[in-house]
Image (tube, rainbow, N blue to C red):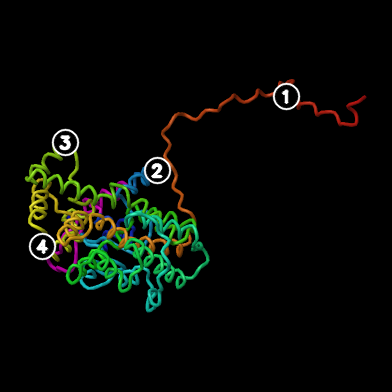
Amino acid sequence: MSTAWITAEEVQHRLGVKAQTLYAYVSRGLIAHRQDESDPRRSLYSFQDVNRLMSRKARGRSHAAVAEEALDHGAPVMTSAITAIVDGRPYYRGRDAIQLAETATLEDAARLLWDTGDMDPFAGIAPHPSVALGHDGRSRAFSLLAHRAAADPSTHGRSNVVLAREAASVLTDLVDAMCGSARSGLLHERLAKTWRVDGFRADLIRRALVLVADHELNASTFAARVAASTGASLAACALAGLSTLSGPLHGGMTAQVAAFVAEARRNNDPRQAAAQRLAQGLDLPGFGHPLYPMGDPRGRSIAMSVRYADDLLDIARAGEQVTGVAPNVDFALVAMARTIGLPAESPFMLFAIGRTVGWIAHAMEQKAQGHGPIRPRAKYDGPAPMRDAPEPPEPERDGDAAPEAPAPAALAAE
C-alpha cells in the first residue's frame, strides 16, 4: 500500500469492527491517528497499527490472553452506549462532556446518561429522613448506600421509568448524607451551602461534578455493572462502585495528590519533591492518564476555570516539567478545593457524587441488556490439582466375563 494512513471506513472493513470499537482502539493508543490535511473534519489512521491488530487476531490467541489484556486498558470487553473516549475527549451519549460541563448541572448529566428523554426523574423528589451514620461525608455515604442496598428492591422486572425515579432518589439521598442534613436546591447548590461557598465557587463545584460523572468502563463502573448483572438494587450497585472507588489507585488517588502537595509545600521546592519521588521509584500522583496521552481534558477544564493558588501553580508546573505529562483530574480536584477553600475531603466527595450518576447509568444499561450475571473465567496457574485420597481399585474380573450379579435378597438366606 502506498500510504501509511487509511480512512476510518477502511479500518472498520479490515478489522470487521464498528466505529465505536475503532474509537476505543484509538483512545487506548492501539491505533495512531492524525488529521486529514485535505479535510480537517476527518481523521486518518495508521495502517501499520491496523495491520498489527489484524495479525494478532489471525494468530488466534487464547481466550484467556485476550481477556487478560482487555481488562488492563486493552480492547473493549463490553458494549455500551453511555460514554466514548475519542480523540482525547470523553463524550456522554455522543455529546462532548467537556463542552457539556460549561453549563450543565449534574441533574442534566444524569438525565442524559440515564437516557430519560422528556421525563424528569428529579421532579418532586422529597428528602428522606436521614439514616446515614458517620462523622464525615465519606462514612455517611457508605452508611446511606448500605442501608438502602439492604432495603431497596431488585432491578429485575422493573420499568426504566421506575428505575430512573429510584436513581434520582438514591443520588439525592447520597448528596444529603454527605452534606450531613437534607438541603434544598440543585445538587451542586446543596454542596455549596454545606461548604459555605457561592458564586463562581459554587459553579466550579457544578463543573467538577459533570466532568467526573462517567468515564467509560473504569474499575468502579465495572464493579457496579457486575452487581447490576445479578439483579442487585441500584443502591447496591452504587455501593459496589463506591467501595471500588475508595481504593488508593482510583478515587482514593486524590488523597495521594493531597499528600504530595503537602510534601512539596514542606520542601518549598516542588521540582525537587517531584524528582525525589521518581528517584525512589514512586509515581507522581495527579499527573498523566493512560487514556489521555495529550493531557486529561477534564483537569484542563477545571484549571482553565479557576486560577490556582500560586504555590499550587508552581507544583503543577514542576510536576509537568519533571514527568513530561500534564496534571490530570485528580490533581485538578485537589488544587481547586485548596484554592477556593473547600474541606479536605471534598475532592473524594465530588468524585463519588458525580460518578454515582455513571454507576447508575451503567447499572440500568446492564439490566436492559439482560445478559445475566457477569462471570469471567480465571486462568489458573497454581499447584497441579490432586485428590486427597486415591480412587478405590477396580474389582478383579475373570477374563472378559461380566461380574456376577448379586443374589436376589429372597435367595440370600438359602
Which residue is depicted at the point 90% across and 31% down?
410
Q: Are marks 1 and 2 in contact (CB under 8 Å)?
A: no
Left/right of residue 234 with respect to residue 341 in the rendered view: right
Query: How far across and down, in percent of the image, does residue 399 sit?
Result: 73, 21
Q: CA distance from mark 2 to mark 4?
A: 48 Å
Q: Earlier in the sequence, mark 2 or mark 4?
A: 2
Q: Are marks 1 and 3 in contact (CB under 8 Å)?
A: no
- The image shows residue 336, relative to residue 395, as above or below, that is below
Q: Earlier in the sequence, mark 3 or mark 4?
A: 3
Q: Which mark is residue 64?
A: 2
Q: Earlier in the sequence, mark 2 or mark 3?
A: 2
Q: Which mark is residue 280?
A: 3
Q: Nearer the viewer, mark 1 or mark 2?
A: 2
In the rendered image, which residue does mark 1 sit on? 400
Q: Earlier in the sequence, mark 1 or mark 4?
A: 4
The region drawn magenta spans 28-57
Q: Among all residues in the image, which is located at the extreme right?
A: 414
User: Quarter of the image containing the C terminus?
Assistant: top right
Q: Earlier in the sequence, mark 1 or mark 3?
A: 3
